[in-house]
Image (cartoon, grey):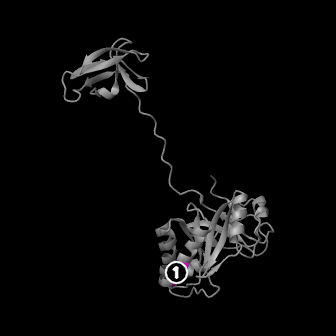
Amino acid sequence: MSSRQYGVDVAAYQSTNMSSYHAAGAKYMIVKLTEGSSYFNPKAHYQIESAHAHHMYVHAYHFATFSDSVSRAKKEAKFFVAEAKRNNISKKRYLWLDWETGDGNSVVGSRSSNTKAILAFMKVCHNAGYKVGLYSGTYVLSQHVDTTKIVKKYGTCLWIASYVAMGRIDSPDFNYFPSMDGVAMWQFTDNWRGLNVDGNISLIDIHTDGAKKKPVEKPKPINKTGIVYAPVINHNPNWKIRLLDSDGHYTKYIRTNTRWKYFDVKIIKGMKCYKLGTDTQWVPAKYTKIIL
């Protein structure tokens, strides 16, 4: 899956119909669910429904009003998580914290206190089983938040807003990318393709769990020759093992506590077998041990 995908973020100001955004190339939507500890977006349900109908990934964000208060941050996070669950936001997606100036939220606290509050919020969301991220403008993140701690805790999880110019922008100009460690997504315009909606582009694949795929292990070569040992079965030295022919018919027996040279390996009647001599002398591997 490509890491650089276009997406939009929507609130109550936008339509409940995602068709125009999808037609313009948006692969995902980030819907504003909540703000503070009581407001929820009245259009969210319909925006989510439309996004799913257009096969868009759906993430969600919360607008913070807790400033640098850890206790209020936890309260707002619990409210956000409850709304995310109520709206069936998949735990494969991100819950983003929008922490910026506005609606009573203050960013002028110390970097330390701001960061503690932000981390407290993100922890509640993360503990609820969601992926988490932090949104704000370049200046706020660089001047008022210790993003190093955020990224150390949650990996590449910053959603950064930085516009080269105001007005319509159709695609990002990476010559003006606001370079910063830990950026997962860049909001590069507030009027993407003339649709009066924020335009974003992901820098990492935000739609997988981020886990590295394990390399496919090559099957180990099977030795076609060697020595097998037929151990005593059920502590009975008189126990014998019945052999098969290559078509799966039982033939003669061999005694346990004996060693045999084998010349081939084959699956017969769903069992791995070793050829001890002719095509009528195959011993089931489950009754033997390879010793050479």
Q: Amino acid at mark 1?
A: Lys
In the image, taking residue 256 as reference, residue 163 lies left or right, namely: right
The image quadrant of residue 42 is: bottom right
Q: Position of residue 114 (x, y in %)?
A: 51, 82
Q: Which of 12/101 is in front? A: 12
**Residue 44 place in picture, x, y as percent:** 69, 71
- Up/down of 224 relative to 191, above or below: above
Asked which secondary structure carries label 1, the reply is helix
Picture residue at 43% right of the left edge, 23% below the top: 269
- Specify the principal SS of the magenta part: helix
In terms of depth relative to the viewer, which is nearer, 281 or 262? 281
The answer to which of 192 and 277 lies nearer the viewer is: 277
In the image, residue 69 lies at what x, y percent? 50, 85
Q: Quadrant of residue 52?
A: bottom right
How packed mark 1 is, by other alpha carbons closer than 10 Å (few <14, some 14-19, many 20 or more), is: some
The image shows residue 63, relative to residue 106, as above or below, that is: above
- Single out the residue that lies furthest toward the right: 194
Residue at horizontal 54%, vertical 68%?
A: 132
Mark count: 1
- In magenta segment, residue 50: no
Instruction: List x then y, in percent, for residue 189.
Output: 72, 71
Q: Quadrant of residue 229?
A: top left
Examine the rendering and report whether any part of residue 137 can be seen. no
Relative placement, left or right, of 275 versus 254 is: right
Residue at mark 1: 75
Magenta-drawn segment: 72-77
Residue 130 visible: yes
Q: Nearer the viewer, residue 150 or 66?
A: 66
**The C terminus sits in image quarter:** top left
Q: Please tell me which residue is depicted at 76% across the width and 76% down the height of the picture.
A: 166
